[in-house]
Image (tube, grey):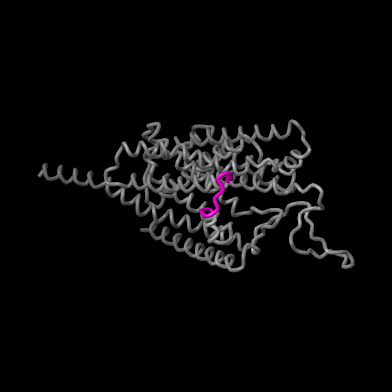
Amino acid sequence: MKSKANLYSWMGALGILALMGFSALGYQLVNGLGVTGMNNAVSWGLYITMFMFFVGLSAGGLIVSSSATVFNIPAFKVVAKPATILSTVCIIVAGIFIMVDIGSPERLLNLLLHSQFKSPLMWDVCVITLYLSINVLYLYLMTRPKPDPKKMKIMSSVALPVAILVHSVTAWIFGLQIAREGWHSALMAPLFVASALDSGLALLIIVLVLLIKFKLFTVEKKLITSLAGLLVTCVAVDAYFVFSEVLTMYYPQEESVMLILNEMLKGSMAPFFWGEVILGFVIPLAILLFSKNRQKTGLVIFSSVLVVIGVFFKRVWLLFTSFIYPHVEGAPGITLGKYIPGEDPSVVPNFWLKHGQYAPTLVELMIVVGMIAFGTLLFIVLSRRILLASSKEAQQPKQNQSRERLTAAQ
């Protein structure tokens, strides 16, 4: 009863935060994107950061879920339902951030009326729509009274490559832009997929422990240990890709590339870059490399939280480092579209910007917190509806068997 009361308290708090977020969104819709910190120099901000982050969290969950069936891993099949629920909710939240970022909902019609299939942005819209449809259908097949193994196998075989593709296409939005030195890389897609695997898996571990705590789901402790072993492998692969990318940027010493790299290593983005390295790589690897530590749930959760934070930091430095130095040859800078009064009133006010600057406003922060709260609330509702129902169905045959034995004994 206590856990149920705590759950309702959390749901109430999440509901309030979600309501505040949607209220802030309404304010933005009325007043326009001018209420955000975005500008001509930094045209993508916190919303796109969260979009990238949640696409990765979603892809990681579905990859774990579908791999259990495709590669016939019985231990992982146990967590297929919560992993798919988590994946579905994360991709819904990612889609919400895209709609928030475009400013006006009616602009979505332009995707249908004026589609440009040469654009990676349009590729992403198509693959995310497909991905969401697969998630919903996959979850529907899982929750049938008698799931068809053949259909489940087919769906898993489709879901796995699409999950990898959805994050690859998101990466190509950045990697195919030749004008942005910090993005233009063939490693961008592998980097995104690797970080999706470790962040999605880390979030799944956290969620499983919370579901157990609130008595919504039950798994054996050794499964958490096995998932932790898989997590440390994914973190190591992600760290290798980041090291390879940084080395490739540093070694030729190209002036334009070094501007970006120095900003990452010792400039304004350094706290996020080194935060990812220390929190997302070094500490989790130092803990989870030892099998005895993987058997301690507290250490596994601690490491998983650090991995999620580290991947979020990656999204921040990856997005903003390439906005700091705009490419505007032959001009004094980028116009902000407004005058910035100078210290000397006799001097013509300055409206040129030579370096990209961005800081999220209170409206943006409220919307982001609200959408995350809404996603968390949606996950709790779906989990209570699906996982508790599945638990009751699983217990019913056991109860019937016990009754039959009792009757026979009498």
Tell me: residue 219, above or below residue 11. above
Name the quadrant of the N terminus.
bottom left
- The percent position of residue 285, horizontal first and vertical second, equals 57, 35
Q: Does the magenta stretch include residue 119?
A: yes
Horizontally, is 162 left or right of 317 in the view? left
**275, 173: nearer the viewer:** 173
> What is the quadrant of residue 322 in the picture?
top right
Instruction: Point out the stretch of residues depicted in magenta.
Output: 111-120
The residue positioned farthest toward the front in the image shown? 113
Tell me: residue 94, above or below residue 362. above
Q: Does the magenta stretch include residue 372?
A: no
Horizontally, is 232 left or right of 358 in the view? left
- The percent position of residue 43, horizontal first and vertical second, equals 66, 54
- The percent position of residue 26, horizontal first and vertical second, equals 55, 67
**168, 229: nearer the viewer:** 168
Horizontally, is 352 left or right of 149 in the view? right
Main SS class of the magenta portion in the image: loop
Tag count: 0
**244, 121: nearer the viewer:** 121
Name the quadrant of the C terminus.
top left
- The percent position of residue 311, horizontal first and vertical second, equals 58, 44
